[in-house]
Image (cartoon, rainbow, N blue to C red):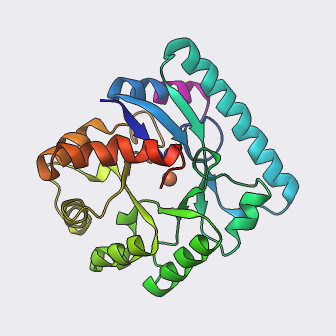
Amino acid sequence: MNFADLHCHILGGVDDGARDEKEMREMLDVAYDDGIHTICFTPHFKQYEFSSVAEIASYNKNISESFNKAKEYAQEKYPDMKLFLGSEIMYHHDISNSLLSSFCKGIAGGSFVLVEFDPGISFFDMRLAISNLLRNGMHPIIAHAERYGIFIKNPKRLQELKELGASVQVNAHGIKKIAIGKIARFLKNALKQSLVDIVATDSHRPDSSPPQISRAYEIIKKLCGADYAENVCCKNAEKILNNEN
Ligand SMILES: [Fe+2]
C-alpha cells in the first residue's frame, strides 16, 4: 500500500516540526518504512506571527531550502518517493490574498487549502470561514477535525460543512485499537459515518510524533472496509494533489 500524507511538519528547522536536517531525514526514513511514499509538507503559516513582508519572505526562503534538501535526500535514497509543498494555514479572513501574495500555499500549489482554526471556534464562525474560502475559489480541508469541541459535541456538523464543499482531515495517531474517551469515540463515529476524507499524520518528530499511517489504515479497514480505508489513506489525497474535486 502506498500511503499519502497531506499534513506533516517534516521539513527541518522551519516550524515546530523536525528541528534540523538530521531529524528531517529520520522522519523521511520512518515515513518510507511505514509505506508513505507520497508526502505534501505543510509547514505552519500563522500570518499574525509575522510583523513584516520581509519576515514572511525569510520564512519562505527557509522552507524552500529545506524542501530542496528533502528532495535531494529522497532522490538519492527513495527514488519512488513523491514530495510536494503546501501549508497548514491558521484561518484568517484574507487567506486568498495571502495565497495570491505567495505568503503560503495550497496543497501542491493547487486550490485545496489545509486550514486550522482556533480550537474553541464556534460552529457559526467555522461555517462562515468555510463559506468565505469557497466563495474565493478555494477548497478548504479542515485540519485535525478531532481538535474542535463543536464536532466532538455533534459530529453531524461535519456533514453540513462537507455539503457546503469542505473536506475533513483527521490525524492518524488518534485512531487506536483500544482507544477510549471523547475524541476516540468521535473518530470512530466519524469514520463509520464516512465523514472523514483524509487521514494524515500531522507528525512533528521521528519518535514521539512519527509519520505513520499503516496502523490507522488497518483499524479503519476492519471498522469500515478496505475501500474506504484506501480512499482516506491514499486515493483521496492523490486526487487532491492532482487538484481534482
Ligand atoms: Fe499540523
Locate residue 25 relative to residue 101 in the image: left or right: left
Locate residue 184 relative to residue 4 in the image: left or right: left
Residue 101 % position (x, y): 80, 58
* 177 is higher (above) or lower (below) than 151: above
The residue lying toward the viewer, choosing from 133 and 123, is: 133
In this orientation, does residue 230 appear? yes
Locate residue 176 relative to residue 114 in the image: left or right: left
26 in magenta:
yes
Residue 207, picture quadrant? top left
Residue 13 % position (x, y): 65, 37
Residue 201 % position (x, y): 40, 45
197 in magenta:
no
Residue 19 % position (x, y): 59, 36
* 11 is higher (above) or lower (below) than 176: above
* Residue occupying the point 52% across, 29% down: 82
Residue most extreme to the front? 244
- What segment is highlighted magenta in the picture? 20-27
* Residue occupying the point 52% across, 44% down: 241
* Residue occupying the point 61% across, 31% down: 20
